[in-house]
Image: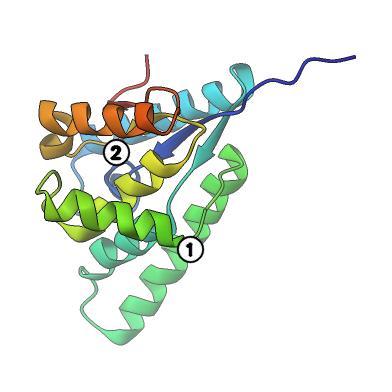
Amino acid sequence: MGTTRTRRAIFIDADILVPLFDPAAKSEEVKSAKSLLSRLKHYRVRKNYVIRISQVALAEIFMKILKHASSLQENSNLANKVLEAIWRISVELEADYPSLKPSVVSLAKQLHDEQYVWHFNDALILAHAVDDRETEFFLTTDRNILESYKLGEWVNEYRRKYMMKKMRIVEFLP
């Protein structure tokens, strides 16, 4: 009889992937994003983590990138390039793209209303990670999220209340 192992997940915020597609990204941001993708692959292959990206994060990536397009044709070309790149990343990381559930929306509203997170799309992305029992890491470069002690405490209290493992909000994987 085999033992069952609890799955562990890493949720990725949109801002982690944006530099890979953003023509205005600085070279060190692109280098950092590529390095992080390599690290994520290591976590998936060697440490058996599941990589998850909220569908809201995908929409945010498109919105941030497409704002650089100056015409409908350029918009279409850029969208196709982003789709192709996201598909390649998805294959490499074997990423999951969970859809929104009512519990995620409700949690996001709470995060936003209590001003733990200022932008509702950020609240939705973070709530996706918080609501997922398997999440161990939420990966972001958002300074407001990373540096909010109050938010970190709230997240861990919420997860403790529902008997979920602790979730770490980090910029880099250990």
Tell us which disc is closer to us: 1 or 2.
1
User: Could you tell me if residue 148 is visible in this image?
Assistant: no
Q: Which residue shows up at 35% across the image and 84% down it?
A: 73
Residue 78 locus on image (x, y percent): 37, 69
In the rendered view, would you say 168 is above or below 33?
Answer: above
* Residue situated furthest right in the rendering: 1
Q: Dot 2 corresponds to which residue? A: 30
Q: Is residue 107 left or right of residue 112?
A: right
Where disc 1 sits, the SS reads helix
- Locate residue 62: give its quadrant: bottom left
Looking at the rendering, in which quadrant would you find the N terminus? top right
- The number of discs equals 2
Instruction: Give the left or right position of residue 124, taking residue 143 as reference.
Output: right
Q: CA distance from mark 1 to mark 2?
A: 18 Å
- Which residue appears at 16% of the width and 54% of the height? 112
Picture coordinates of residue 12 (x, y %)? 39, 40
- Apparent side of residue 53 relative to residue 57 in the rendered image (left or right): right
> In the image shown, does 105 or 24 lie closer to the viewer?
105
State the residue in front, 138 or 40.
138
- Measured along the vertical axis of the image, is residue 117 above or below residue 105? above
- Quadrant of image for the C terminus: top left
Q: Position of residue 158 (x, y in %)?
A: 31, 34
Q: Give the amino acid type for the residue marked by disc 2 in the picture.
A: Val
Q: Quadrant of residue 163?
A: top left
Q: Secondary structure at mark 2?
A: helix
Question: What mark, if any, has residue 140 been given in the picture?
Answer: none
Residue found at x 44% / y 63%: 81
Residue 133: % across, % down: 49, 35
Which kind of residue does numbered mark 1 sit on?
A: Leu
List the residue tagged with mark 1: 83
